[in-house]
Amino acid sequence: MDVKIEEVTIDKCKSLLEIGRQTFYDAFGPPHNTEEDINGYLNEKFTIDTITKELQNPNSKFYFALINKQIAGYIKINSNDAQTELVKGNALEIERIYVVKEHQGKKIGQLLFQKTLDIAKENAVEFIWLGVWEKNPGAIKFYERNGFKSFDKHQFTLGTDIQTDVMMKLVL
């Protein structure tokens, strides 16, 4: 299986929006959250305007994982003022890393993470950090296998539900 990692450009905005909505819904929709909460969040955070602004921010980068030119997953990384939390130090945030259901278990998430690691090293970043839902043990184990350690918690609001994210970081 040949997987190509490619930076997402503004002309791929619609494709990014579609894959973002699909993978977020698959990961966090019912039964994990109510239909109302998940759709409210998607309609607020995953719009063409929001995705366009994110793509235009020089401190946010998106990358697709492509198999035979089909999008199998994507990652969003943030630096400087694009990070969702103020963290001390020269850091890079993984805000989103998602793999399409049919491609899960094929090491695509690992390849996307490796791209982030390469970028972090190129930019002499001190650490990579992220927030992961405390009720997502598979993702937490993935990050732990890659050397991440829990360092804090923060709240994440999905619709009307206030949830807890575990904040994890990998010191480089």
Image (spheres, rainbow, N blue to C red):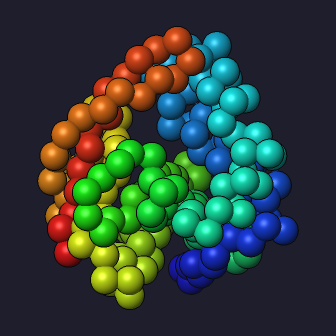
Is residue 109 visible from the viewing direction of this image?
A: no
52 left or right of 161? right
In the figure, 26 relative to 155: above or below? below
Quadrant where the C terminus lies?
bottom left
Q: Position of residue 12 (x, y in %)?
A: 79, 65
Q: Position of residue 59 (x, y in %)?
A: 55, 66
Quadrant where the N terminus lies?
bottom right
Asked whether 7 or 145 is in front, the reply is 7
Question: In the figure, residue 92 lies in which quadrant?
Answer: bottom left
The structure residue drawn at horizontal position 84% and vertical position 68%, both measured from the top left corner, is 11
Question: In the figure, residue 14 lies in which quadrant?
Answer: bottom right
Q: Position of residue 110 (x, y in %)?
A: 38, 68
Is residue 74 visible from the viewing direction of this image?
A: yes
The structure residue drawn at horizontal position 70% and vertical position 77%, both measured from the top left corner, is 68
The structure residue drawn at horizontal position 60% and vertical position 34%, both measured from the top left corner, is 25
In the figure, 165 relative to 81: above or below? above
Question: In the figure, residue 40 lies in which quadrant?
Answer: top right
Total tally of numbered discs in the picture: 0
89 left or right of 159? left
Q: Residue furthest bottom?
A: 122
In the figure, 19 relative to 39: above or below? below
Asked whether 13 or 66 is in front, the reply is 13
76 left or right of 64? left
Q: Position of residue 62 (x, y in %)?
A: 60, 65
Asked whether 171 or 1 is in front, the reply is 171
The structure residue drawn at horizontal position 45% and vertical position 64%, both measured from the top left corner, is 79
Asked whether 122 or 4 is in front, the reply is 122
